[in-house]
Amino acid sequence: MTRFDTVEPILTARGVWKHFAGVQALENVELELWPGEVHVLMGSNGSGKSTLCRVIAGAVAPDRGELCLKGKAMEFADPAAARSAGIAVVYQETSLVGTLTVAENILLGGEPTRGGVFIDEQARRRQVSELIEAFGRSANMRAGIDAFIDDLAIDQRQLVEIMKVIAQRPEVIIFDEATASLDREEVSALFDLIRALRAQGKAIILISHRMEEVFGIGDRITVLRNGKTVASTLLAKTTRDEIIAHMVGASAHHQSGRRARPGNDQVVLRATNLRTTRVDNISLELHSGEILGLGGLQGQGQSDLLLSLFGAEAKAARSIELSGSLAKIHSPTDAIRYGLAYISGDRARAGAFGIRSIFENLVISSLVRRCQHFVRRRSAEASLRPILETLKVKFASVDQQIQSLSGGNQQKVLVSRWLATKPRILLLDDPTKGIDIPAKEDLYALLSELCSDGASVILYSSEDAELLANADRILVFNSGHVVKELKGEEMTEFNLYSAALAHA
């Protein structure tokens, strides 16, 4: 008998379903959380972990299912209602106010007052100082309580976010990849705090892909796959390989990716000792006609590498050769003129000019590539039409604003924009976000044709099956490093996750 058999769970999720446009994010998910436990939640990219946590935290309403807190069925209208019930979340993306100080952020909305009206500044400073004394100093909390958030480094912001949540004194705390931006000393201090909270009877849900952390702090684990609960057990009774097998499925041990294209030894891009704020000392080669995949968990430096190659990472240190000659790429304009194209799945930040027409969005990259200021409308449309038809873009007129299209069709327009430049090298940063399955197949068929004609591709995809099905080789990332290269029969989902988690 374990200690979890002697008490009632503080939180229970039963038969939780959630569907987003075209995606079944959660399907009949089950989860039980006990007081005084650290419950690890794991799963591959897109397995439903964050969606489940957002349901528990009141940020997303489930389509059906039941959420019980202390045995009572609960329906949270919003995150504020969940916080009032004693549930708090530490997200990887902070929710701090940059123009306020550390002290102001930590107690924002819960400031001590005098007479119930005026903020008691002396009491606020004392409370924040006590919290930093208990946690922040041992975690190398360098910033003072009067420092502004905008002036802090990312790890310091994450520490403030954690203290902000702890200050609310919740009974259930969800840490959603909260350790991703912390160093070892800071993680160690956080885990000391989590152990103290566990000893107080607090219930902790921890999302992490670092196996050392999982086994070092966790009591039990629940694994999600494709939005379903596939395993729930004591960590003392399982192993790392068993967890990975649950994450990817038994058949994934032997399912290899696509067969590699005919070999070509011609190196079209060589990057040496590439460094950015998120990438450390990476060197790679890309061959003619090859699709080189970038694998690993999300946010491990894949996007930063692509942006650096495209000249969009201002602080990058890089040495890039194209077909044996040193390339001077200091900006995206330089990259485009060298024949590079960058396609991102993040349309809002790296793609669409919303109020401009489809036609203007289509031709902008071609104008930069050719150093032109004007375009011949008729000839441009004639060259663009076949690409639009191949990707089955749905629109009434190329003169309508791109923001009038669905998200998927906007993404197809952006893909068409770059294909029109006839690039030598395509840098694809999760390019199929928001695109339906047939359109994805059309895009990869088109990429295969381009590779047959001598173009080359570096591809990052958050969908592992997509990466395995289309890449010839995969470089697996972890914490800004390439930890393994997979090729041939090694390219299985199991090996991909095993490599991604090997140093985690």
Image: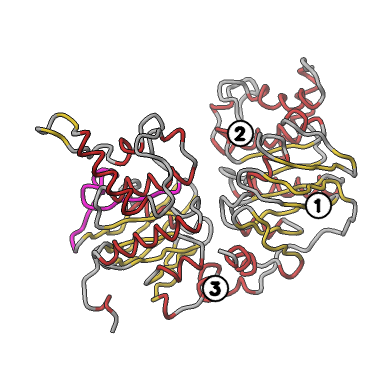
Residue annotated with mark 3? 245
Question: Residue at position x 75%, y 59% from top?
Answer: 473
Amino acid carrying mark 2 in the image: Ala
Q: Residues within 10 Å of mark 3 (few under 14, many from 20)?
A: some
Residue annotated with mark 1? 285
Question: Residue at position x 35%, y 53% from top?
Answer: 135
Residue 163, position as x, y percentages in the image: 33, 48
Question: Residue at position x 42%, y 51% from top?
Answer: 19
Q: Secondary structure at mark 3?
A: helix
Q: Is residue 41 visible?
A: yes
Q: Are marks 3 and 1 in contact (CB under 8 Å)?
A: no
Does residue 355 appear left or right of residue 90 in this picture? right
Q: Secondary structure at mark 1?
A: strand
Q: CA distance from mark 3 to mark 2?
A: 36 Å
On screen, residue 192 above or below 2: above
Residue annotated with mark 2? 350
Extent of the magenta region: 71-92
Of marks 1 and 2, the one in the foreground: 1
Q: Nearer the viewer, residue 18 or 497?
A: 497
Q: Secondary structure at mark 2?
A: helix
Q: Are marks 3 and 2 in contact (CB under 8 Å)?
A: no
Residue 113, position as x, y percentages in the image: 16, 35
On screen, residue 171 above or below 131: below
Q: Are marks 1 and 2 in contact (CB under 8 Å)?
A: no
Amino acid carrying mark 3 in the image: Ala
